[in-house]
Amino acid sequence: MSDENVVSVAIACYRNYEHLFEAINSVLIQDYPYIELIVSDDGSADFPKEIFEAYISENKSDNIVNTVVRTETKNVGTVKHFNHLIDCCSGHYLVFLAADDCLYDSGVISKYVEGIQTAGEDALIVMAQTGMYDVTMTDLDYYFLRPHVRSLLEQKKSKELYESLLLYPFLPTTSTFFKREFFDVLGKFDENYLLIEDVPLHFEITKHGLPIHYENFVATKHRHGGISHGQKKTLSKSKANYLRDCVNISKDKMAEAKHLSLEIPKSLREKAYIENCWREHSLAFEIENAKLSHKIIAILKHPYYIIVNRWLRSRSVSFNRLFKLFFTVGLALVIGANLLASSFDPVFMPVLLLLNKLSIGICLLAGILYIVFLICKIFESISNFDDTRLDF
């Protein structure tokens, strides 16, 4: 056996081991003859290392040429954890797998190797399809890679892929096959971020025009319910850190695109801005026991969005329309009160005067609200607070 034949499959977990046996089994059933299996925990206090070592030892076949079960000395986050795994892997090829995902069938690794060898010596990375499943891994919701993305991959259009990544992440890490040399060329995962390892890497791949070879088969079954698919109303610490990474990646890559003189459509900039407003709003107002200082900073950074979102509960409600409604109703009441004053008996005059004052008050309130709205927009356009101050 040559080292160049070995494929290292690294399964990463943290605290939740409910589906880890399923992930391990999906590697143990592979028909490829030279596999190194690594199971690595990111510093969980109760990781049952001996149980998984014994299970793998009892169930592995001869094609599992090496096994490692390890744990970090402390929780370091997904990005650093993956970088440590690169150093742990001895194989010529690398596959990363989350503990709650699994390889699609017994032929996945063989198809990966065949694909990258067919692609030629210069091929450093292969991507395949990911099936997005429910928590039971029985019902397929959809396939992650959309047809237009597959087309861009197959045509190796790096510039279009880079620009599309500014809009939303659409390339999978969970169904990606790396040649070790890939990390010598582009470096490891970007440790400026804590939990999101794949999106910054995809930007680097497409920015440098590194060709991605696409193999048209389903490689991985991805289970909904991880950090990126959280549904709880109150944010966990992990979800908060994930959102912070999203905000920072979006801002960093928008700035990078501007530096590269790429023309970013206005619609894309607006979408990215609204997404970041929502994320920062969530960080400030939906995390459990959020500090008052975090809420104040969020309001100062995005006063218009935060105020509208908190007071009116929907960004679709237009402050302009609200102002016009208040002003129109108030003006109509002022005119109506004066017309009625000339027609009614003087005995009703106090009531009409009160109505007139109320109408003027409504108009003034509309004007004040509109002035507040304009001030918020001005503050938002010039605010430039540091995100690192939102430290959770």
Image (cartoon, helix red, strand yellow):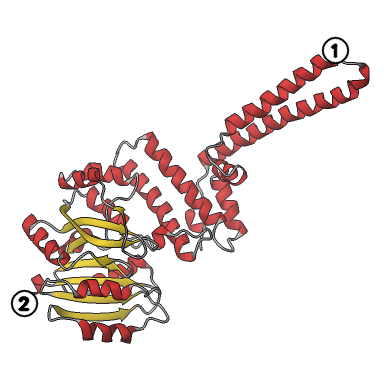
Q: Amino acid at mark 1?
A: Ser
Asked which quadrant contains residue 374, the reply is: top right
Tell me what residue is drawn at x 63 percent, y 30 percent. Answer: 323
Q: Which residue is mark 1?
A: 342
| Residue 117 lies in quadrant | bottom left
Q: Say few, some or many: other residues with alpha carbon within 10 Å of mark 1 (under 14 / 14 to 19 / 20 or more).
A: few
What count of labels does the image hold? 2
Check residue 131 in the rendering and tell me which mark sits there, or answer none: none
In the drawing, what numbered circle is on residue 1? 2
Q: CA distance from mark 1 to mark 2?
A: 104 Å
The quarter of the rendered structure image containing the N terminus is bottom left
Name the spot of residue 119 as percent of width and height, x first.
8, 55
Q: Amino acid at mark 2?
A: Met
Location of residue 153 in the rendering, given as x and y in whole percent from the top left corner: 19, 47
Query: Which of label 1 and label 2 is nearer to you?
Result: 1
SS under mark 2: loop
**At x 21% / y 71%, what residue is drawn?**
9
